[in-house]
Image (cartoon, rainbow, N blue to C red):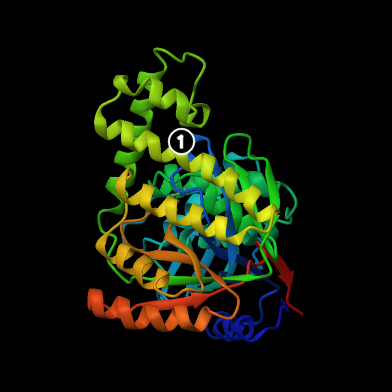
Amino acid sequence: MQPHDKRTEEICSEFAKVFDGKPTHVAIAPGRVNLIGEHTDYNDGFVLPVALDKDVRVVFRPRTDRRVRLYAVEFDSWADFDLDSLAFNNDVFWANYTMGVAWALEEAGVRLAGLEGVVSGNVPRGSGLSSSAALEISNALALLSAAGAPDALTGTEIAKAAQHAENVFVGVNCGIMDQFISTLGEEGQALLIDCRSLDYQRVPFPDGASLVIGNTKASRSLANSAYNERRAQCEEGVARLQSVLPAITALRDVTSAQLEEHSGLLSPVVYRRCRHVVGENERVMATVAALAAGDLDEVGRLMNTSHESLRDDYAVSSDALDAMVDAMRSVPGCLGARLTGAGFGGCAVALVSKGHERAVRDAIFERYSKAMNIWPDVYTSPASAGARVMPID
Ligand code: GLA
């Protein structure tokens, strides 16, 4: 990616309109799509996301004081604050991500400096493709760079700081997956992330397949409260299972056989939530093995099973997501399809044999729009690079 590609140049022109002079750097952080491993990250489990070729960018230059002035093109609004007086902003919601990240980076021990910049993104917002993580991570890299401390924290530490910002400052109880893959994603690779140790491993994205992402454009209004409810149900499952399995600290530690043996300790709903998480962790590892063996049919089958489990056991699908997945699977070249991200709306992802992308796309437009009376969006993306900062000359 060249620092002077067209999008960066356009954002630089915006910079020239709102500030005098030129920016010195651009920070870029991608959105993500998760191949498999859904609702496992906050259970200390495994995930397998890829970074997308859609991102949030900040063009910026440092200031000598501690003031941050950031203009967001798509929102046509400003985050304008002093690093010494951070307070939740009810009027400019996105500014809380910037402030939260600044707060978390200083909590992590980095003394920041001010900056002025323009932020712009093309990750679809509110669609389960992690536009928030991309905003957080691009802002984090810009703040670190403006402070003259681009290497003060590792990628993992940056991801953790951004998650902390979202959990505590913004008030959204997300796991680590989105920030992690946005920071550390690599071209041509999925990442197998162990969300307990935060170790990760590259898993080459298969040559013979592409990702097709279908955006249901359906509202996700209940997502936040339902997400928190699922987390609480997982915690309840762990607490009950600890009476017979004292060594476990998360559902990550429970096998399918153990869950079956002790299912009588759990309410039917909590049992089903646990069954999803335990099975999903096993499916992630099976997917990595199938990818290594070049068995794409098996990868697709595991993705299908993941969707069914999210729909029936975890209850985070929706009519729109089910209709999207049906439309994708109606094309023979579709190897597998599932909802991706938190669910309740947003996007589904299909693994498609090379050459069949167009057919899947056409089927989505035709079948999904007919079933739901909503015009969807469709994206394709290679597995792309993670976040980076580059100078602008
Ligand atoms: C959201 C959260 C992630 C993860 C997924 C579900 O994207 O931000 O941390 O929990 O939902 O897998």
Q: Where does residue 129 sit, x and y in percent of width and height?
A: 47, 63
Sort mark 1 into few (<14), some (14-19) or many (20+) by Cα contacts within 10 Å: many
Helix, strand, or loop for circle 1? helix
Residue 235 appearing in the image: yes
Q: Quadrant of residue 327?
A: bottom left
Q: How many marks?
A: 1
Q: Is residue 325 left or right of residue 121?
A: left
Q: Where does residue 160 sit, x and y in percent of width and height?
A: 58, 44
Instruction: State which quarter of the image contains the C terminus.
Output: bottom right
Front in this rendered view, residue 384 or 123? 384
Q: Residue at x 52, y 59 (%)?
A: 300
Which residue carries the number 1 mark? Answer: 278
Q: Residue at x 75, y 51 (%)?
A: 151
Residue 117 appearing in the image: no
Q: Where does residue 297 sit, x and y in percent of width and height?
A: 56, 60
Q: Residue at x 36, y 82 (%)?
A: 365
Q: Residue at x 66, y 76 (%)?
A: 23
Q: Amino acid at mark 1?
A: Val
CB of mark 1 near ligand 1 (< 8 Å) = no
Front in this rendered view, residue 147 or 308? 308
In the figure, 337 relative to 85: above or below? below
Q: Is residue 293 left or right of residue 179?
A: right
In the figure, 271 relative to 58: above or below? above
Q: Where does residue 325 sit, x and y in percent of width and height?
A: 37, 66
Front in this rendered view, residue 186 or 292? 292
Q: Quadrant of residue 94?
A: bottom left
Instruction: State which quarter of the image contains the N terminus.
Output: bottom right
